[in-house]
Image: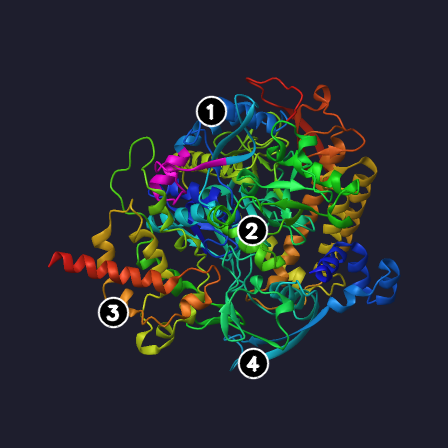
Amino acid sequence: MGCWYACNVLRCCSERTNLRQHGSTAALILVHGSTDWLESSVIVKLKIFRYDPKKDKKPDYQRFEVDADPMDRLLDCLNRIRWEQDPTLSYRWSCGHGICGSDGMRINGVAGLPCQKLAKDFKEEILLEPLQVFPVIKDLIVDLDPFFERYYSIKPYLIAKEPPSDGERRQSPEDQHRLEEAIRCILCACCTASCPVNQAKETAAYVGPAALVRAFRYLFDTRDEGLEERITLLDHKDGAWGCQTLWWCTKVCPKMIPVTKEIGQIKKRIYETTHSKK
Amino acid sequence: MNIQHDIVIIGAGLAGLRAAVECAGKADVAVISKVLPTRSHSGAAQGGITAAIGNEEEDRWEWHLFDTVKGSDYLGDQDAIEVMVKDAPRAIYELEHMGVPFSRTAEGKIAQRNFGGHTRDYGKKPVKRACYAADHTGRVVLDTLYDQCLRHHVRFYSEHYVLSLIFARQRCVGVVAYDLATGELHVIQSKTLLLAAGGCGRIYKTTSNGFATTGEVLNLAYQSGIPLEDMEFIQFHPTGLYPLGILVSEAARGEGGVLRNGLGERFMERYAPTVKDLAARDVVSRAILTEIREGRAIAGKDYVHLDLTHLGEEKITEKLWEITSFVRIYLGLDPVHEPIPVRPTCHYVMGGIPTDGDGRVIADEKGSIVPGLYAAGESACVSVHGANRLGCNSLLDLLVFGRRSGLSMAKEVLKREHPPVPTQPLKEVEERIAGLLGHPGVEKSSEIRREMQTLMTDYGSVFRNEAGLKRGIEGIRSLKERYKEIEVRNYGNRFNFELTEAIELGHQLDLSEVILLSALNRRESRGAHFREDFPQRADRYYLKHTLVFQTPRGADVRYKPVKITRFQPEARVY
């Protein structure tokens, strides 16, 4: 731990930034009287998917090397490539700490957020590719319109008749707590893009885990009065029953939401509701 | 082809979406955003939204008013603050009705927690006033408001970048927007336009702000002849995760976390004997940096510790899940067992585009209205935060004044038709882009940006003085010269972020100069603006708002009075 703390302290020193630009390690050693930090500077090797469907016949991969601090995020490495090596590289990013959901992509084949991954955790070349399921617009950017359309299809809003004219509705902490994991969702699309059901052509109409997490959030909100409407939306082969319990969504979720379990609870609620009628 | 909407909103954060929800159904509304839906930086707000609803203990709007005025170091306009704090309970209940999943008390009411500077009985002791949903309040409110916009068919122009505001006979009539996915330019006409695109924290090296918070709407207004108000007041949040600067919510201290220096001392006892770690942010940030300057940082480094270890695992994981995950991911530490390294990080701009209480943009110190133009949220300066914003008052500001702007715009568009739009602004933007793309420059955006961030951090952060500010201004002006020779190597028209970042940099440089100039001219210390050479507040000379105008002769600094209704300035002690 001490090693990278020291390294990061140095990172904040303007000397290091300036010297690094000039590549003068000797001068740096004079300034700080130590070479400890040198051991912690790493070369990150990346192999990145490149494709502009408007121009290129087929996708290609391009290799880059970035001089990074071990505690740098992969997003920092991508930024540095764009600023210093190839300004045409395209990917989305915004908050930089896993709350906005912009930068979902495949990292060594598994969907995740490069703003949540640190350089120090990779020893080999890192393969970066766009999310599956959605059409590529350019490089690591995919068209998320179909994602948001499916999201909208589950009626992602509270259906309730008359709230009290002034004041709040009550909800027990236990009832609220049931939603606590689902409301961590940042709509990064990693789950839906990783779902083998969404990936297969014949079942691609499946609404997908992200939309179902939001459906769960409203279905199990004790303030919601849209049970029947919601059950109708979810009770079909491309709704909750599209889920084949393959767990990929849960595995990749950057916010550690138990997605598969929540879909399971939706299925149970559908079963209970439709059978209690009969 | 020109696109027409009654109401156009720039920015899809909380202020913009709250305004959109208000207008939807009453008028044809469109929201333009640089990013996809729910990516706006309001989503990173963690701790809560203040309202004196008294669910946990007795509270009154008068106390909230006093705390906000005192927090603003008496620079906030008290009439506007009164509007905000009186409307706060309604704003919270309304969110609850829309479905925001607030955390709850044992009786099932909306839960509330302590936050810095919020007290009972005019400063006697901390009060639980911040309504919250664990530590992802901003995100769940953003999601809920977005869902409401979908439900009411608000039109979104996502990944569209505003390059110019269009005026016709002094009235704002629309924008020129650049479609990031295609590189096409669109003229989007409006009967009223709302600027709600956040602040400009990315001007500094270390910030809690997302990469998109580059402040272009502030500068677009400034370049259109609209002044910028109180830009010297930049909030540094005391607890940025070291070294990245990611926000570690004040909720951590609201839930009982304490700050400790290298000697293990709970040093805030010395700086704010009554409320200690729950003092206002400017006070705590200065305290942390003073500890570091005087050699009491952790192990001789440049940070202090935020200690949660006495709170217990259950409370930490239940109420502070997000920040716990940040600490685990980015530092490999577990806050349940180890203290968190923190230091101040640039967080919020108190200043902005001057508006009245209904979001209408004000053109001068006399209060003249700019027809057709509104502003809300961090982009605006109402001013409810004055020289220092209290935690959780920003979400309240967004909701209250976002809604009021929406109400006001919906009323205004009823009696208006689209006026003819001049073609000149589109031509100018086309020429500008062609100039940037076809220009064989020598300067790199990333280089100039780094130097700008260093200058602003060295001379325009928590501690300032005349020599430094002058050096900073000189440095920024020389960067502006170099910026004229900027090189854009990417000539592509699809997701050309090199182009948009180069344009952003131009805006950032202008704003940097405004910030430093405002700071240089305020020869006193007030709220977040601390001058080492003038360490006292000087009400006799500076109890007034700064207004900086762009003129052909350069920036012109003028002032307007503060509105004081109930509380006369007194010494600010926590």
Question: Please, which chain is the residue tagged with disc 3 on?
Answer: A
Q: Which mark is residue B336?
A: 2
Question: Please, which chain is the residue tagged with disc 4 on?
Answer: A
Residue A231 horizontal/vertical position (percent)? 23, 58
Share a chain, discs 4 and 3? Answer: yes
Check if residue B106 falls in the magenta segment: yes
Q: CA distance from mark 1 to mark 4?
A: 61 Å
Q: Residue at x 44, y 34 (%)?
A: B404
Q: Is residue B88 above or below residue B222?
A: above
Disc nearer the start of the sequence (4/3)? 4
Q: Which mark is residue B447?
A: none
| B25 on left or right of B228 | left
Residue under label 4, please give it. Answer: A60
Q: Which mark is residue A237?
A: 3
| Highlighted magenta segment, given as a residue range | B91-113
Residue B505 horizontal/vertical position (percent)? 67, 53
- Indicate the amino acid at tag 1: Trp
- Indicate the amino acid at tag 2: Val
